[in-house]
Image (cartoon, grey):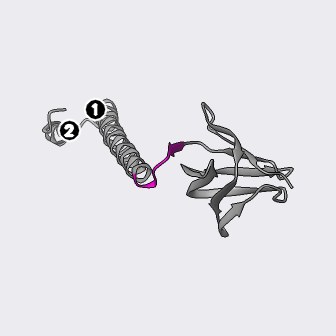
Amino acid sequence: MAKSLRLVISTPTRLLVDEPDVASLRGEDASGGFGVLPGHADFVTALSACVLRWRRDEKEHYCAVRGGVMSVKDGLQVRVACRHGVLGDQLEKLEADVRAAAAAQAKMESHARVEQARLHARAVRQLIRYLRPAGLSESILADGQEDGQ
């Protein structure tokens, strides 16, 4: 039986973790939480949004992922591919970092939705002007312009 695992966590643009001496790893998939020790049977699973935890040199490390794919090969190699991961050595700080990143992402998405709606409304007004029937009142078209557009 092997004494340690090699853990690799990567995103499409970055290698987050490449540690050769991992004693154990915990993760979570649709069936619940699970652990991996050296010598574990080969498998592949789709990770849920979770915090991966691993022990190395008697210290615990963390990586928050929004899901991904994890594979164990030959009981020695654990590979995780995810779209986004946040590393941390303190669970409380990692949780705060993840919350801050999620809030920033939500704010950016909200702003993008507002801008998309504004552009859509402007395009519709332009189409109405171009295609308006001869009897359409100018006051109806002006209603959407009162907000400074």
Mark 1 — residue? 129
Question: Quick check: 125 left or right of 51?
Answer: left
The image quadrant where one finds the C terminus is top left
Mark 2 — residue? 141
- Residue 115, image x, y percentages: 32, 37
Q: Residue furthest bottom?
A: 31
Viewer-proximal residue among 82 and 3: 3
Q: Is residue 87 magenta?
A: yes
- Residue at 73% in and 57% down: 45
Q: Amino acid at mark 2?
A: Leu
> Of marks 2 and 1, which one's residue comes earlier in the chain?
1
Question: Quick check: 88 left or right of 81?
Answer: left
The answer to which quarter of the image holds residue 130 is: top left
- Residue 95, image x, y percentages: 42, 53
Magenta part of the chain: 85-92
Viewer-proximal residue among 74 and 70: 74
Viewer-proximal residue among 140 and 8: 8
Relative to 29, say whether 145 is above or below. Answer: above
Relative to 47, say whether 129 is above or below. Answer: above
Please report contact status of discs 2 and 1: CB closer than 8 Å, yes or no. yes
Q: Secondary structure at mark 2?
A: helix
- Residue at 65% in and 62% down: 29
The Cα atoms of the two marked residues, 2 and 1, are separated by 7 Å
The image quadrant where one finds the N terminus is bottom right
